[in-house]
Image (tube, coloured by chain):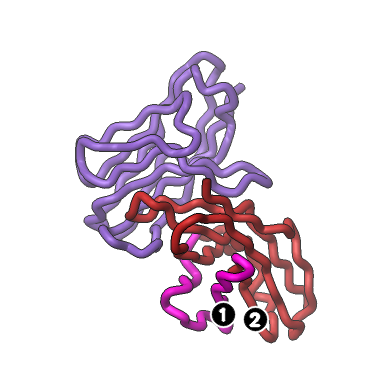
Amino acid sequence: DGGITQSPKYLFRKEGQNVTLSCEQNLNHDAMYWYRQDPGQGLRLIYYSQIVNDFQKGDIAEGYSVSREKKESFPLTVTSAQKNPTAFYLCASSTQGANGELFFGEGSRLTVL
Amino acid sequence: AQRVTQPEKLLSVFKGAPVELKCNYSYSGSPELFWYVQYSRQRLQLLLRHISRESIKGFTADLNKGETSFHLKKPFAQEEDSAMYYCALSGISGYSTLTFGKGTMLLVSP
């Protein structure tokens, strides 16, 4: 079953804790992305990676970190430095020269208590 | 800076009525524009892209560079069209670093 898998679907954390969201794809896509989705805000790009061992900051990277050690995996860490981490996080992937077609995961909802 | 504006948070129409979801953009280069859709309990997915000039599920969208718009249209709305629609603009860095609008919720009533 091909696609993008995000885990966990729901996550709760206490203030001051780091948390890592998993994103795995078996589509053999080169590029992977993390977006944050807030009500009334649309999707905002956090980080993206075009190739293994390389990644770039998006529009709202502060308080987040990523790694891309394998083509299939692009985990996102929400650090304690992120001032408003409660949100819905979407991971996506695309082929090289995809002309805008992103394949999205089902998302992870993080709630900070 | 590039920006995508969707002025309507919610658009409510009756089945069979025409639909137009508005999208305006700000971009200094040659834009690539897209519409994404998220149906209830489904993943966000690409609906159509302007370079394809295609009609998907009866929806069309024409890029108007003079008005910097990319409105999504359908002549006769169906209940199954109810969803969240996002307009998106491709970034200058290549690949698909899209800038999304805030989205418009389309509700089609019977």
Q: Earlier in the sequence, mark 1 or mark 2?
A: 1
Badge 2 amino acid: Lys
The quadrant of the image that shows the N terminus of chain A is: bottom left
Q: CA distance from mark 1 to mark 2?
A: 7 Å
From the viewer's side, name the closer residue of B92 and A14. Answer: B92
Q: Is residue A72 shown left or right of residue A17? A: left
* Rendered colour, chain A: purple
Amino acid tagged 1: Thr
Describe residue B28's horizontal placement relative to residue B74 as left or right. left
Q: Would you say the residues marked 1 and 2 are in contact, meaning their CB atoms lie under 8 Å apart?
A: yes
Judge whether B108 appears above or below A65 on screen.
below
Query: Where is residue B71 drawn, in percent x and y?
Result: 63, 71
Give the magenta part as a residue range.
Answer: B44-68
Secondary structure type for disc 1: strand
Note whether residue A67 is visible. Answer: yes
Magenta: main secondary structure equals loop
Please say whether residue B40 is visible from this viewpoint.
no
- Tell me if residue B53 is in the magenta stretch: yes
Magenta span has A27?
Answer: no
The red-coloured chain is labelled B
Labelled disc at residue B74: 2
Q: Which residue is mark 1?
A: B60
Q: Which chain is indicated by disc 2? A: B
